[in-house]
Amino acid sequence: MQMLEIDALRSTQGTHGRREVLKKADAYRALDADALRDAIAQKPVPVVQGYGGEYFAIDHHHVAAALHLVGVKTVPIVIVDDLSALSEGDFWLSMENRHWVSPFDARGERIAFQQMPKHVWESEEDDFRDLAADARDAGGYAKTDVPLADFRWADFFRRYLPAPFSEPEYGARIAQAVALAQADLAVGLPGYLGESRKRS
């Protein structure tokens, strides 16, 4: 399996959930060396080779950021596509057309591709990315293979819920997000469970 230094992984996401990164980092710290090695091997980072021969992560940003936080230097990668022949502009256009990049900040506003964070751990902290993950884990919606699904849920929650300004507020938002995820407003979002839960 091909290995790559985490420092060499380019980010394709403007935001991440800081709580999610810290949670994963704590889980990695609790593992012994053999278990950590196995855990890393089970989560290869899918990448696209882009302009300048650089490798752009298209998933597992939280995993790579958490491993960086605990001092791991390299991760296994899987090359999904090679777009290194494209110009920088055409590369980003192709990435966006395939839903492999999310050029938005923590307010949900679009940023220029040149403003994208370079490293996976440098993405802007977004409470609503965390909220999407916690609402999913609490049964609010199902995990899917739809690209950038959690970003769509984060934007949905951002539209209807006020931003939390403390950890107690954040904890209260999780239950609100789960209820909102199962409401008719969420019909059409990837992993929506509302209708199936009503029939059960």
Image (cartoon, helix red, strand yellow):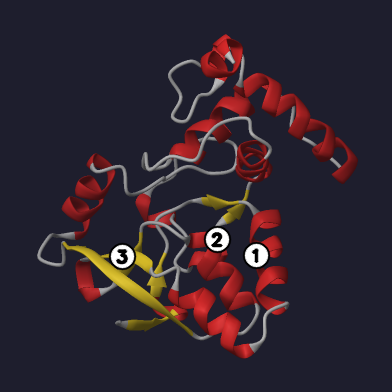
Residue 5: % across, % down: 42, 83
Q: Residue at x 49, y 65 (%)?
A: 120
- Dot 1 or dot 2: first in sequence order is 1
Could you say whether the residue bearing mark 1 is in a helix, strand or loop?
helix
State the count of labels.
Answer: 3
Q: Residue at x 64, y 42 (%)?
A: 137
Contact between marks 2 and 3 (CB within 8 A): the answer is no
Q: Quadrant of residue 106?
A: top right
Kindly identify the amino acid type of the residue bearing the numbered disc 1: Lys
Asked if residue 113 lies left or right of residue 70, the reply is: left
Instruction: Inspect this view and state whether residue 95 appears.
Output: yes
Could you say whether the residue bearing mark 2 is in a helix, strand or loop?
helix
Disc 3 crowd rating (10 Å Cα; few below 14, some 14-19, many 20+) is many
Name the residue furthest right: 168
Mark seen at residue 56 = none
Q: Quadrant of residue 78?
A: bottom left
Which residue matches tag 2? 62
- How much space separates mark 3 and mark 1, taking CA atoms? 20 Å
- How much space separates mark 1 and mark 2, taking CA atoms? 8 Å
Kindly identify the amino acid type of the residue bearing the numbered disc 3: Val
Q: Can you tell which of label 1 and label 2 is closer to the viewer?
A: 1
- How much space separates mark 2 and mark 3, taking CA atoms? 14 Å
Asked if residue 184 lies left or right of residue 46, the reply is: right
Mark seen at residue 47 = 3
